[in-house]
Image: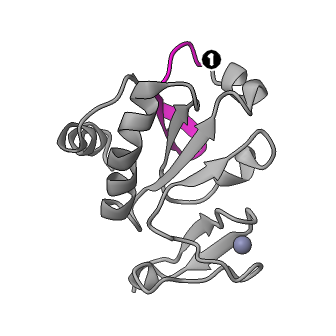
Amino acid sequence: MTDPLLIPCPHCGGLNRLPSERLSDHPRCGRCKNEVLPGTPFAVADAGFAAQLKGDLPLLLDVWADWCGPCKAFAPTFEQAAARLNGRCRLAKLDSEANQHLAGRLGIRSIPTLILFKDGREVARQSGAMPLPQLLDWLSRQGV
Ligand SMILES: [Zn+2]
């Protein structure tokens, strides 16, 4: 038996305790009943971001904006990575225009920017889009 993992709900931020062998069973949040691991990127905002940094899975943040062509071109790659890494890493998107406070606090100077968080702390950062194999390779070098 493995220890259960603590994973925040992408919808309500509630912390769920899930046995690792159940992560692929589409577990639902104990508080709001939405899927905890939908396998798709979810949006984060100024409000509630701290709750998404909690738990045992790393969080990969894609900082983007609506006017940014390379950001939009990268979106399908990020979605594919979310499906591929479901249960191992959580993937979230931050609209830097709508959430300038958080984007400023993260020191975003260009977009797209990818930031990997582990145990609530930034461990790696990459500016610019990457093809999927390069993205997965970058993450595996960070232990994801
Ligand atoms: Zn929830």
Region in magenta:
107-125
Left or right of 141, for residue 46 = right
Can residue 124 be seen here? The reply is no
Task: Give the residue drawn at x 56%, y 25%.
Answer: 67
Q: Please determine whether, in this image, residue 54 is positioned above or below residue 95.
A: below
Location of residue 121 in the rendering, given as x and y in whole percent from the top left corner:
57, 37
Residue situated furthest right in the rendering? 47
Q: Please determine whether, in this image, residue 7 is positioned above or below residue 94.
A: below
Type of amino acid under label 1: Gly
Left or right of 14, for residue 23 = left
Left or right of 36, for residue 89 = left
Q: Which residue is at the front of the view, 19 or 136? A: 136
Task: Give the residue drawn at x 48%, y 77%.
Answer: 3
Mark 1 = which residue?
107
- Color theme of the render: one colour
Q: Quadrant of ligand 1?
A: bottom right
Left or right of 84, for residue 89 = right
Q: Secondary structure at mark 1?
A: loop
